[in-house]
Image: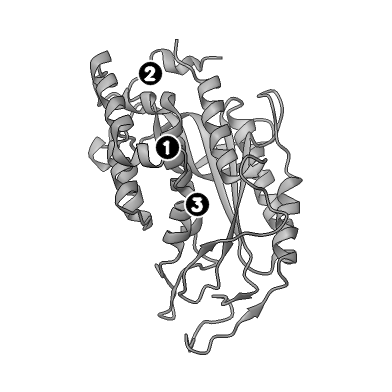
Amino acid sequence: MVWPAFRETMSPTRAAPGPRHLAVTEAKFLRSEAHHHYRQRMFGQRIIARSMSATRIADQHGNNWQYHSRSDRHSKVACWVVLFDVLQRCPLLRRHALEGKVAFGINHRMIDFRTDKQKDLDLVICVPREEDEEEAPGRWRSFADLAREYGVILDDKETEVLASLPPLENRPVGDVLMALEAKAAMTAHVRAAPRLFDELTSAYTCINGASQHAVAVGLVMINSSSEFVSSDRNKRGFDPAAPEVTIERQPNGAQVILDRVRKLRVRSHTTEHGFDAVGVLPLHMRNDGGNVDIANIPGFPAGGENYHYETMITRIASLYDGRFQAR
């Protein structure tokens, strides 16, 4: 099925590229050294771990954290990385970006037409609507700008791939084609599980109800560390050398979250309700300034299985190709 809005939509500030320009840009991406080196791998999991290792979140007491319960940096980084991986594996999305047919929106509010419930989604891919007079073109950020703003840490080869991708801009949101919601369960897993489930259910309900054909994506980062330095328990007078450490029952806690994620409704057709793609990312994070690592948790999805990060990325790219193929 072809999304009708694609037939005539073009960014008002960008001229349509000719066939030769499209071919040259795509060839540049395919020729990039990093693309060839990593063509069978995905960057996302290690970028998220590397970026979350940095202490970038300052609290009101002068402490700097890797993860803070009142911050959404983890979800911003995760959604950026998901889109980065999808762009590499979806030629149609790259072509739509180059032609100016799609843009991205941040914290976009989607409203379920049936229930009138609303939710702000972390990141959406959309058909850009025409700008209002006060929306000057110069104010919009690029996808690369967003990486710098969010503190996404790329190595040299990942930076090369980013430079080879077609431009994608933050523009006023029209029709939503893809919506991403990322959550994290870092501590107190048993207590956090019901709320996490409700928030993700609310996310796909609003996506489905606002835009039936939009690809609805959910990603959950799950901490497997048996010790965690919580920003809620270490505030004023926090001593990094002697923090109050929360002891977690692992891998039981991580398994509780995974079991909840597996109960989320998923869909195989746009007439149904649920997420189109769901993934989990197991991490090992003590939140004390040390490295964040990808965790190997017994019983968690392996490569090629449902809910694995790379399976999620492959499914997103396939669904986008299937739903929004240009004629």
List x then y, in percent, for residue 148. Answer: 32, 53
Assign the C terminus to one quadrant of the image: top left
User: Badge 2, how many Cα within 10 Å: few under 14, some, many 20+?
Assistant: some
Q: Which residue is mark 3?
A: 45
Assign the N terminus to one quadrant of the image: top right
Per the image, label 2 sits on a secondary structure element best described as loop
List x then y, in percent, for residue 115. Answer: 69, 35
Image point (33%, 25%), residue name = 100
Q: CA distance from mark 3 to mark 2?
A: 34 Å
Whether residue 141 can be seen here? no
Contact between marks 3 and 1 (CB within 8 A): the answer is no
The answer to whether residue 56 is left or right of residue 259 is: left
Per the image, label 1 sits on a secondary structure element best described as loop
Residue closer to the observer: 168 or 62: 168
Q: Which kind of residue does numbered mark 2 sit on?
A: Thr
List x then y, in percent, for residue 167. Answer: 30, 34
User: Badge 1, how many Cα within 10 Å: few under 14, some, many 20+?
Assistant: few
Q: CA distance from mark 2 to mark 1?
A: 31 Å
Image point (37%, 41%), residue name = 37
**Mark 3 or 1, which is nearer the eye?**
1
**Mark 3 or 2, which is nearer the eye?**
3
Residue 39 numbered tag: 1
Whether residue 29 can be seen here? yes
**Mark 2 or 1, which is nearer the eye?**
1
Q: CA distance from mark 3 to mark 1?
A: 15 Å
The answer to whether residue 31 is left or right of residue 204 is: left
Residue closer to the observer: 188 or 224: 224
The answer to whether residue 152 is left or right of residue 317 is: left
Q: Which residue is mark 2?
A: 9
Image point (36%, 37%), residue name = 36
Q: Which kind of residue does numbered mark 1 sit on?
A: Arg
Q: Residue furthest front?
A: 37
